[in-house]
Structures are given as structure tokens and as C-alpha cells.
Image (cartoon, rainbow, N blue to C red):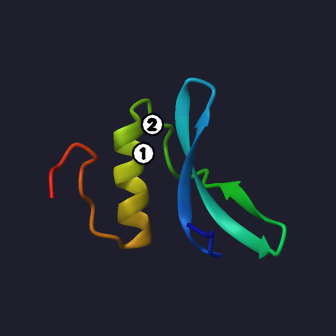
Amino acid sequence: MRDKVGQYSYEIHGRAFRIYICTLVTATGSQALPVYEEPFFYNEEEARKRVYELNGWKYKPKDAKT
């Protein structure tokens, strides 16, 4: 999926996951900055769920069938 300016994502940061917001998209890549107001997440699924909430997407757990 292509990044979009204003879209949130998460990445591993040491032993935790951090939330980032995309600030720039070019033909060769993109730039994202950490969202300092968001806590570190030590569970990937919790970070994923928070990103879905921030982006306004309907969250469905990874292990859910259908």
C-alpha cells in the first residue's frame, strides 16, 4: 500500500512499537515523523489497533476469520 500524507503507521523502535505520521511522499519514497503524544506499544497488535483508530479504519484482528 502506498503511503499518504497524514496517514498513521507503526514501526518497531527498539523493543517497542512507535506510531508515525506520514509527512511527505515523493516518487522515490516517503518521510514519517514519530507522534510523540502516543505511547510506546509493547504488543504489535495493540499498535496496529491504535493505527486503525487514528486512520478511521474498521479494525479487524489479524487472527479473525472472514
Q: Name the residue under label 1.
A: 47
Whether 60 is drawn above or below 3: the answer is: above
Q: In which quarter of the image is residue 28?
A: bottom right
Q: Is residue 52 left or right of residue 29?
A: left
Residue positioned most to the top: 15
Which amino acid type corresponds to the residue marked 2 in the rendered image?
Phe
Q: Name the residue under label 2.
A: 41
Q: Position of residue 54 (x, y in %)?
A: 42, 65
Q: Is residue 28 left or right of residue 54?
A: right
Q: Residue at x 53, y 37 (%)?
A: 17
Which amino acid type corresponds to the residue marked 1 in the rendered image?
Ala
Q: What element carries label 1?
A: helix
Spatial CA distance of label 2 from label 1 is 6 Å
Disc nearer the start of the sequence (2/1): 2
Whether 3 is drawn above or below 59: the answer is: below
Q: Is residue 16 left or right of residue 5?
A: left
Q: Which residue is drawn at 35% across and 41% down?
A: 45
Q: Where is residue 63 in the image (x, y as percent from the top left)?
A: 22, 43
Dot 1: few (<14), some (14–19), or many (≥20) neighbours within 10 Å? many
Disc marking residue 59: none
Q: Position of residue 37 (x, y in %)?
A: 54, 53
Q: What element carries label 2?
A: loop
Q: Which residue is drawn at 56% across and 23% down?
A: 15
